[in-house]
Image (cartoon, grey):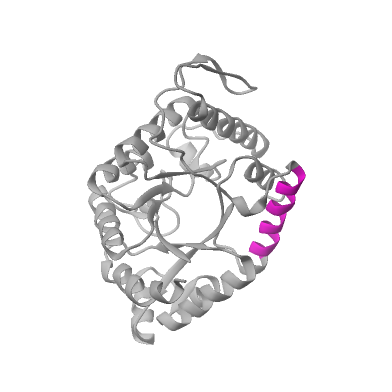
Amino acid sequence: MELRIFTEPQQGASYDDLLAVARTAEAAGYDAFFRSDHYLKMGDGDGLPGPTDAWITLAGLARDTSSIRLGTLMTAATFRHPGPLAISVAQVDRMSGGRVEFGLGAGWYEEEHTAYGLPFPSTGERFDRYAEQLEVITGLWRTPVGETYSFQGEHYRLTDSPALPKPAGRIPVLIGGTGPKRTPALAAKYADEFNLPFVDADKAVEQFGRVEAACAAIGRDPVEITRSAALVVCVGRDDAEVARRAAAIGREVDELRENGLAGTPAEVVDRLGTWRERTGITRAYLQVLDLADLDHVEFIAAEVAPALRG
C-alpha cells in the first residue's frame, strides 16, 4: 500500500510550513504530498497566517522538491473557470517534470465562498458545472498539438481553443466523495483514482461498489481506477506519545482510533490491513494536522510504511 501525506493548510500554515512537510515526506520516501484546496478555516483556531492558494503552492513545490508527486484533494470546481485551471495545472505539471495529480470536486463549503465573494450555486448546478469542467479540462489536455478544442455546454463555452499548454505527460485525475449517483458516474467516465475521505470501511465498500456498477454500465474495467482513502493519522511509540499527538490537534485518542488511524505502529498497520482487505484500497492519504511535528511524518515512514510493502 502506498502512503501519501495530506495536509489542510487552511487551518493555519505558511508556504514555508508546507515546504518543510513536503521535503520531509520526500526524504522519508512517501509517494506523494497532497493538500486541500480551501480558502477558509474550519472549526476552532485562528487559521493564521491565512489561506494559501493550492496551485500557487504546488507551483512552488514543483521547483522546491525533486521527486515526490504533488496534488490536490480536492480542487473546487466553484473556484476557477476550467480553461484557466487547465492552463495552471498543466504548467505546474511541466514545472515539476510530470509529477502532478489532479483532484477535482464540485465544491461544498459555502462559508468560504461567501467570505471571498465566490458564487455558490445549488447542489445540482454545482454538479452540472463540475461535470462540464471535467470534460473541458481533460478535453483541452488530450487535444493534439496543432489542433483546436471547442465545447458548448450550459455553463462553459470554448471556441477554437489552441488547447495549450500541454502537461508534461498524462495527468491522473482523482474524483471522490459519497454522492450515490452522479459521483460514481463521473468517476467511471473520468477518474484514474477514486478517493473516499473520512468515512468508515462499510461506507467505503458501498461507494466503491457503486463506482464498479457505474463502470460496468459504460463498459469500463473498474480495475483501471485506483481505490484510495483519506484518514486522519496519529501514531506514537507508546500510548503517552499517541495521547500527546492527539491533544496537539484537539482530538481524543478513542475517537481517532474509531474514525482514523491512531495508536502504535502495529495498531495502525493492522487497521490499514483491514481497510485493504475489506475495501481493496491500495493507497492511503494520511491527514497530518500538526504540520510542525515533522518527527511524526518521519516516524510513520520508518515504522509503518515498511510493514505495508509487498
Residue 87 lies, in percent from the top left, at 41, 28
Most foreground residue, 42 or 203: 203
Q: Is residue 40 above or below residue 32?
A: above
Residue depicted at x 60% and y 50%:
224
Total marks shown come to 0
Q: Name the spot of residue 184 as percent of width and height, x first.
A: 67, 48
183 versus 255 height, above or below: above
* In the depicted structure, whether residue 285 falls above or below residue 125: below
What predominant SS class does the magenta segment belong to? helix
Residue interval drawn in magenta: 203-217
Residue 254, given in percent of the width and then of the height, sits at 50, 80
Using the image, determine if residue 173 lies above or below residue 177: above
Residue 136 occupies which quadrant of the picture? top right
Residue 33 location, x and y as percent? 37, 54
Depth check: give the residue in front, 262 or 185. 185
* Residue furthest top in the image: 160
Q: Is 32 on the left or on the right of 105, as rendered?
A: left
Judged left or right of residue 301, residue 116 is right
Residue that sits furthest to the right in the current view: 217
